[in-house]
Amino acid sequence: MHQLSSERGAARERAVAWAGLELAAVDDEDGVREVAVQAAREILADVPGVEVTLLSPTDDPAGPADERWRMLPSDQGIGPAAGLAVTAADPLPQDAQHALDTLRALVAVRLDSLALTRQLQRQHLQDALTGLPNRVRLELELRGRLMVSPESIHVLLIDLDGLKPVNDEYGHARGDELLRVVAARLVDAVGDLGPVARLGGDEFVVVVRGDEHEADEVAARIVDVVEQPASLSGVVVRVGVSVGIARGRRGVTVDELLRQADAGMQAAKRAPSGRLRRPPTAPAAGSAQSTSGSP
């Protein structure tokens, strides 16, 4: 009997060790769930009348609390399931309970690690203030599109005119609120034609997937929506906007395309007759020096 108990204990230890190795290799919650289920079943393979089930957030397995073991609290999910329940007619053997507790700790550590990794990825690719993609993510997006279909994209570089006076008069908290309002308006104005990113400060970039006419229409909508009054915690402010437009072409780099759009934006700031402008070096045929916008 003692030898049989030792063999079962060793088998459970091997199941836990296997789970530790497998959990270190998986890179998503679904993988964690699969490993957890398989390991729990291996740990309890010799226990009669045991059922291992995944729990959804609304599941409530029957039976007293001491007859079941839950891998995670119900508010911490593994993918679409909230946890793992072990239901048994009799109390679990002590070594099986210990093995399950160890497995639970391994799963919790791996889930925390995956959550931290996602958080760091978001911080690396996402603007913390507005939630928009940041410059790093924008450059990745642009680099990929320039490799596949460069002439089907237009870059719109957007600069707010009047953010500094808002910061000076009402404080940076309201200036930050204004940036968030502008970000939301840009996303609505662009729709599914392309991503919106924040470069930093008062500059945003839109990558329009479409022809020149569509890019100009998006730019006009941007001017219209951004220049609408914005209510910031009881204070109503208005800002202007300047937009530079540059079209992609084969062989152009991300930096070159952004510089061309920036040149157009600077020209729009200097031009009293319009808020939108393409730079003289823009590659769009027949419109390299065109200007459009509202007076």
Image (tube, rainbow, N blue to C red):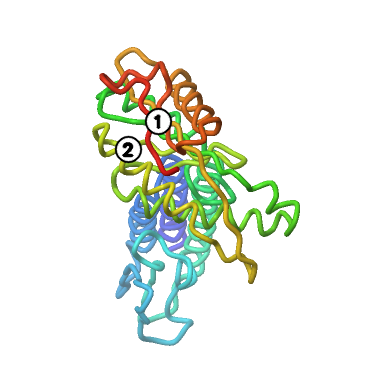
Amino acid under disc 1 = Ile
Total numbered badges shown on the rendered structure: 2
x and y percentages locating residue 228 in the rendered image: 49, 58
Q: Is residue 280 above or below residue 126?
A: above
Residue 143: x %, y % from top left: 38, 24
Q: Is residue 2 left or right of residue 37?
A: right
Quick one: label 2 or label 1, which is nearer the N terminus? 2
Name the element at disc 2. Answer: helix
Q: In the figure, residue 18 lies in which quadrant?
A: top left
Find disc 2 in the rendering and name its residue: 216
Task: Locate residue 126, reporting x and y percent.
Answer: 51, 44
Residue visible at 45% across and 18% down in the picture = 256
Callout 2 crowding tier (Cα within 10 Å): few <14, some 14–19, many ≥20? many
In the image, residue 36 sits, relative to residue 283, either above or below, namely below
Residue at the image point whose x is 51% and y is 44% from the top: 241
Residue 26 vs residue 102, the one in the foreground: 26
Type of amino acid under label 2: Asp
Residue 97 x %, y %: 49, 67
Dot 1 falls on a residue whose secondary structure is: strand
The residue at the far top in this view is 251
Tell me: residue 256, above or below residue 227: above
The residue that label 1 is drawn on is: 245
Q: Which mark is residue 208?
A: none
203 or 280: which is nearer to us?
A: 280
Placement of the C terminus among the 4 image quadrants: top left
Dot 1 crowding, Cα within 10 Å, few <14, some 14–19, many 20+:
many
**Residue 295 as seen in the image, left or right of residue 240:** left
Q: Are marks 2 and 1 in contact (CB under 8 Å)?
A: yes
Q: Mark 2 and mark 1: span between their CA atoms?
A: 8 Å
- Residues 241 and 25: in front is 241
